[in-house]
Image: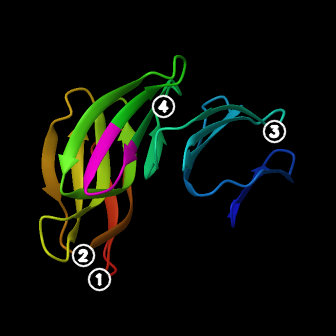
Amino acid sequence: VVDGREISMYDVPKKQWTGPLPPSYKTASLAISPDGKTLYRIGDSIEVWDLENNHLRKKYVDGFISDGALSKDGKTLIYGQGGFRSHLYALDLKTYQKRLIATLSNTDLQYIDYNQDAGLIIMMYLDRTFRNGYWRVRTVDAKTGRSNGWIGNDQTTGRVSISADGKLFAFGTQDNAV
């Protein structure tokens, strides 16, 4: 639960709130490791939190980060940086080495999701090749960085999600369709 800039967690088995973690400038997204022991706060940086002791393990700064998605195995964080030219990166969470996946011109990246098994990234972005811009959804191959083109319509907006098997994508539109 994000309240302003603080983050609190709810422990379901214990039926109690934990935290809050200290405030951060901006939280774009959150991810919890598969073992439930680590929280990744993604925003003005990538913060790695030890949830058992509520302390900051590492802060990785790489400019403003639009959004991020954790791999199923918890070893890689896919993140994006928006602006007039968006960049997608894979961050190895053991070594904190980043790898550029793709650079996309005329795009303002907003949201991403990642399916490790399918090797696909789905992203929602503002296409700036048009004067007022259009919201688009695009898939990108996580290994090659090749884009599979955009999908959706000009009214696409909001979060995007990819199914566990990589066969379905979901995103909302301004005309209330999903």
Residue 155, numbered circle: 2
Q: Residue at x 82, y 44 (%)?
A: 13
Range covered by the magenta-colored residues? 80-88
Mark 1 lies on residue: 175
Mark 4 lies on residue: 72
Mark 3 lies on residue: 54
Residue 69, numbered circle: none
Mark 2 to mark 1 CA distance (whole Å): 7 Å
Whether residue 166 is visible: no
Task: Give the quadrant of residue 154.
Answer: bottom left
174 on left or right of 43? left
**Would you place residue 32 above or below residue 90 in this image?**
below
Where is residue 163? Give x, y as percent. 37, 46
Nearest to N terminus: mark 4 or mark 3: 3
Q: Residues within 10 Å of mark 2 (few under 14, many from 20)?
A: some
What's the residue type where badge 3 is placed? Asn
Disc 1 element: loop
Residue nearer the viewer, 76 or 115: 76
Callout 2 touching callout 4 (CB < 8 Å): no
Where is residue 127? Give x, y as percent. 20, 63
Q: Residues within 10 Å of mark 1 (few under 14, many from 20)?
A: few
What's the residue type where badge 1 is placed? Asp
Mark 4 to mark 1 CA distance (whole Å): 32 Å
